[in-house]
Image: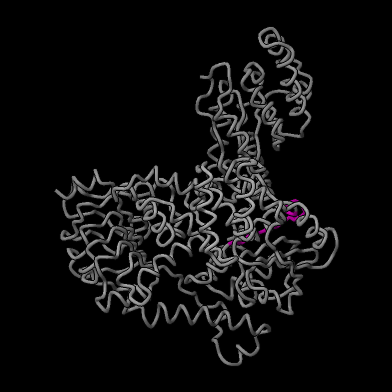
Amino acid sequence: MENSVAESTQPDLRLKWDVFLSFRGADTRNAFIGPLYDELQSKGVRAFLDNDGMNRGDQISPSLLAAIEDSAVAIVVISPDYAGSHWCLEELAKICECTKLILPVFYGVRASDVRHQRGPFEGAFERHVKRFGDARVSAWRAAMRKAGGVSGWNFRGQDDQREMSLLIQGLVHRIMDELNNVPLHVAPLLVGLDSRIEQLLASLSVKSGGVRFLGLHGFGGVGKTTLAKALYNKLVVHFEKRSFVADIREAFLRSGGLISLQDKILRDLSPDMPPSNDLGSSKNSIKHALNETRVLLVLDDVDDAGQLDALISGKEWFHEGSRVIITTRNREALAARNYAIEPYEVRELSFEDALRLFSYHALKREKPTEEFMELSKQIVSLAGKLPLALEVFGSFLVDKRRKTEWEGAVQKLKQIRPYNLQDTLKISYEGLDEETKCMFLDAACLFARSHMTREEAIEIWEGCGFKAEIGLRVLVSRSLIKIWKDDDTLWMHDQLRDMGREIVLLESARDPGTRSRLWDRKEIMAVFKDGSGTRNIEGIVLDYQHKPFATDPSSERLSRDNFMRTPNLASAIQCLQEKFRIFFDFGAERENEEVLRAEYFKLIINLRLLQINHAKLEGKFKFLPQSLKWLQWKECPLTILPPDFCPRGLAVLDLANSKIERLWKADRNKVRRGLGRSNDTITYVSILFHIQLLSCLFF
């Protein structure tokens, strides 16, 4: 995924909160807000609920102000006592100031009284004027007028449970509709995008008929995804159905990747459609969804035309007025004749915009100071005016204030070939201390696509003896790692991930067993079977997850005639490739590879990090290294861990969705029951046993 053009610490995602709830706690919290909040939570809506209630001082807290700014929608429940609280009025004024969408609920009051501050509100405002003065209260009156002028929901009182239930259902339904229209969060400083967006909006001409395809192509780090997201934000309000599908190239490299992408499109366009493990069935469902209504579809980081054919097959699938935006590093992926894709090359920034962006990251100002102006210009030229390089290199220099340090950085850049992005990024890596370098390589090689939260990563690295909080803070400040805003997970630009993996590959080009980290399944199995593992290996990620394909409902066989009748030959080939790859990866080699032998780890005595999700591990568990700090074994098939498994330094044991019923045979070690049962198998969202617990279990 392309990085944001100018982003300091957060990647491009939605706002932190979907809904901010504003209400007067005394008369609505238990009767109405509680059930509403529970219903929102059950639908996966991230609602901010202030748990302090009425226990506040005179000033609204900074955390509440931040929550309002970071919310997409505000539900304002205006009850008779609402205006009696000056902090409720302060909240409402802030909501109006941020131009948030307001969904008012008139709880036992009339909208006209809210607009004119009459009835139950008149006395409250008179008291506020005496205490706070006309100037401050006038802003509150303006906010009440605005809220009272919005078409909202009327609720007579808490005694009518049926009415309240219908009201909550209506609110939640409206929220779900609105959230589909919430733009993707992009960086605070979008340098050089305005003119491009205007040009591309004219090209897409959303108000005209027909089906139009736009292809954004360019090399990695130039800002294709940022541009696509900015376009999406401009267009989304014009379409009833929309979908932004990211990381397509990466998904196709994983087993079951095509199915996961199909599921993503179907979830966005037809949320009531149940997921399917069958390629043909899912594809037919996508065809129906695309043909049903106008859609806005963004396919991000497509690698070749075959991937397009596997997902959408052709222009004729789309309803009149639909728009499709594709980003790719490979212009040839846009050449397929059955789409008529209009290509647009995303080029590097102009020199002025690049200088501004670099200064933003390196000096926290839009224009370099006179002292650093000439050096800044040299760096911008040498970095190729690429947004990702300017962000990372600027972040590298942000704490360096001596000209000699900048001059040294310029000399390093001069040794790099023009437009060699990864070597430019590597300069920032080389400026880290050894421990932080180790954390970066762990993230790039082992954690980058695991959706690991910040807290989980901290626990693992602290278990390894690292100063994890400090190290992660450095990596984030250098723009080498980002923390996703909505769920606190680690995220890394694929160019940075590839740079980290290249560093590890260069440790030993021909002998994987002597490298520090292994993530390629074929290389790992070769190391295991050859017995070529060494004490150099610190981390292994081996995930056997796959989705078996269900039988096609029509029970058609993949015969030669069926294949030849497929209207789109490239699409048929892509489906066959996916089926054959899964067959060979998880069929012919399944018996040899999915069953691991504990003896494989006998020589890998310094292994810190191990992921063996969905695998069967047999043999003498005593051969698992004592050095293990993190073991992730999702869907572990065992019911009890063997007694000879005793890694005394283990910091985190992750047995999510496993059959484990107890850790060891002693009753006192019985695993506490998870969230439910399915076919007499205990299921878990996450079970993380920390070092303090493990110490009492082992002795």
* For residue 153, above or below residue 222: above
Residue ID at (60%, 59%)? 382
**Could you tell me if residue 227 is visible in this image?**
yes
**Could you tell me if residue 483 is visible in this image?**
no
Quarter of the picture containing the N terminus is bottom right
- The scheme the figure's colours follow is one colour
Residue ID at (44%, 46%)? 474
Highlighted range, magenta: 235-246
Residue extending farthest bottom: 560
* For residue 474, above or below residue 243: above
Which residue occupies the foreground of this view, 397 or 605? 397
What is the x, y in percent for residue 395? Answer: 53, 48
Question: In which quadrant of the rendered view does residue 145 lie?
Answer: top right
Is residue 555 one of those drawn in magenta? no
Residue ID at (54%, 17%)? 57
What is the x, y in percent for residue 97? Answer: 71, 30
Residue extending farthest top: 130
Residue ID at (56%, 38%)? 47
Residue extending farthest right: 208
Q: How many marks?
A: 0
Question: In which quadrant of the rendered view does residue 385 lie?
Answer: bottom right
What is the x, y in percent for residue 414? Answer: 55, 61
What is the x, y in percent for residue 525? Answer: 32, 75
Left or right: residue 364 compared with residue 617: right
Is residue 242 one of those drawn in magenta? yes
* For residue 576, above or below residue 245: below
Which residue occupies the foreground of this view, 367 or 504? 367
* For residue 26, above or below residue 430: above
